[in-house]
Amino acid sequence: MFSSDYISRLSRLIFQVITLAFVSLFLILPLCVIISESFGGGLKAYLNAISHPDTLLALGLTFLAVIVTLPLNVLFGIVAAWALTKYEFRGKSLLSALIDLPFAVPPVIAGFILILYLGKHGVFGSLLEKFDLNIIFSTPAIVIATLFVTIPFVARELIPLMQEQGTEEEQAAVSLGASTLQTFFYVTLPNIKWALLYGIILTVARSMGEFGAVSVLSGHIRGKTVTLPLHIEILYNEYNFTAAFAVSSLLMLLALLTLIAKEFFFWKLNSGGSVHQVQEDTVPGDPAS
Amino acid sequence: MSIEVQHISKCFGAFQALHDVSLRVEEGELMALLGPSGSGKTSLLRIIAGLDSPEAHPDAKVMMNNENMIHTRAGNRKVGFVFQHYALFRHMTVFDNIAFGMRMRPKKERPSKKEMKDRVEQLLNLIQLENMGNRYPMQLSGGQRQRVALARALAIEPKVLLLDEPFGALDARVREDLRKWLRRLHKEIQITSLFVTHDQEEALELADRIVVMNEGRIEQIGTPDEVFHQPRTEFVMQFLGSVNLFHGRIERGEAVFGPWKVPGLLGKCPEGTAARLFVRPYDITVQPDQQEYEGTIAFIRRIQSAGPHVKMELEPESGERVIVEISHERHATLKPRVGEKVLVSLRNARVFTEDYTI
């Protein structure tokens, strides 16, 4: 009969094969396809596709969305997580539910909801018109859609960690004379820095790739309000496969970079960065004078 | 610096943790807040530290040296607080943990780098962790962490030291050593200290005076001898040390508990009042069943002679079983056997009725 050692080795082998198959099927193979397709028309066609003004504009808009979204989300995420985990207040569960809302609402629907609010005939439409603010189908729309969709990422990353860490260290800091700001910068922030960076990476990844909400809210006007994912879709729908894949390779490259960064921060987050060597308890003698 | 609190109440939602508590800790005193969990002792300590605020009351006061500090920020109260789970800053070395309080001071009041270093080293010396300054809390044992927490609290040169279950998370042997060490330390630095504990032994051994708390109220304040030998309430009697408890009633001026009667209640309590009798296991006399002795007849049901005393379980002819503790010497002369008939009498029995105590 099989020994248990044999079975455990066999099951390990099976898991390794499954993992490898997954990675090849969903990461390596698509990458190869994208690269081979994007160079299908030769290097020149590739360079043409990624240096086309529309592509550069989409790249710029994507970066803009990330650059504006990120600091706002970091700020919101920290404040929300801080409030939810370190304080008791009315409406706490409501705030918690609000943070999760973008997770629950499909991005396309989120886009429609925002149009209902900000559109010409929307709730705030007349007010926006009065101040001559045009949000829908313009650059701010891209930012707002991205912001809405990525709101949970930083907060959701921080909340479990801050909950686990409790408030004792903050209380200790306060009792030692630290102000609220000092407590935050010297005690809270160092304790959450890896989780925060991890949340930032997730936000960046999602902001770059967001399609549904941005598509609805920006109106994907070519050469005006098109981000990288929208640009790829347009090219693809025009049967311009080489260009579509070339731009995809750009987005894929960005995704890979964030994936690597994510893995690094995740590893840092779990290792805690220190060696845990616990001392034996020793008996203290007389207090020294 | 003395501490005095007056009319302090605290609610957590519908739960009232403290009911109008007033208390005074004298300068240089080491005082224990003793009680079961949920008795409000930690809430009171946190309110004194300024980490929690009491319910608004016109006469509510938290005084330090006769100055009301109720609206003063925790950081400005000159209070050193030691947390139950140490609450050391996990990302800082032992040195940085201890120096934290000094570093957070406004620039004008902040000591120079050299002064800070000297002060930290002096404190490391005091807690006997001289060469551990660059370790992280994770690398220390529970007892060492507790001492670092104490040094960190002392670094701000507090006028008052508050400790929340200081030895609660440590194992028995370390606890005992640390307890002795803290007692000596307190003798040396003479700082007004208040510590919370649910361990009666800890309170009796360490404290100059003990505050016994139950359900958000103070049951008794007194020296260890007073609360142990003259408990003012049933709760104190039961919480400090083991007791035998008998339920009975007042009949013709006597409190009657099965075979036992306590006289002297004539005219003081109405007939039929429910009464409870408490007696410590070592306050029970056991005599052989012979003519010259008096007492209630009981049978020995169990003898346990391993331990500092000999424990016996006796069953009177009528009534509830009694736990008795006798010395090993007495055990040697009495030579009791399981099943044997003996005579039992009570000393120092305390009777509590609804609103009367002897």
Image: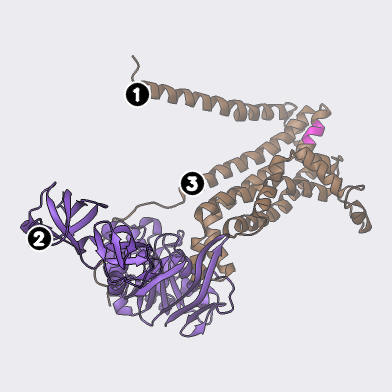
Tell me, yes or no, whether the highlighted magenta stretch contains residue B29: no
Report how many numbered discs are placed on residues in the image: 3
Using a 10 Å C-alpha cutoff, classify the residue at mark 1 as few (fewer than 14 neighbours), some (14 to 19) or many (20 or more). Answer: few
Residue at 72% x, 45% y: name it: A149
Find chain A in the image and tell me its colour: brown
- Which residue is identified by label 2? B330
Q: Is residue A49 above or below residue B234?
A: above
> Which span of residues is magenta-colored?
A231-235
Amino acid at dot 2: Arg
Q: Position of residue B227 (x, y in %)?
A: 32, 71
Numbered circle sitting on residue A270: 3
Q: Residue furthest bottom?
A: B66
In this view, the mark in front (2 or 1): 2
Q: Chain of mark 1?
A: A
- Which residue is identified by label 1? A5
Amino acid at dot 3: Asn
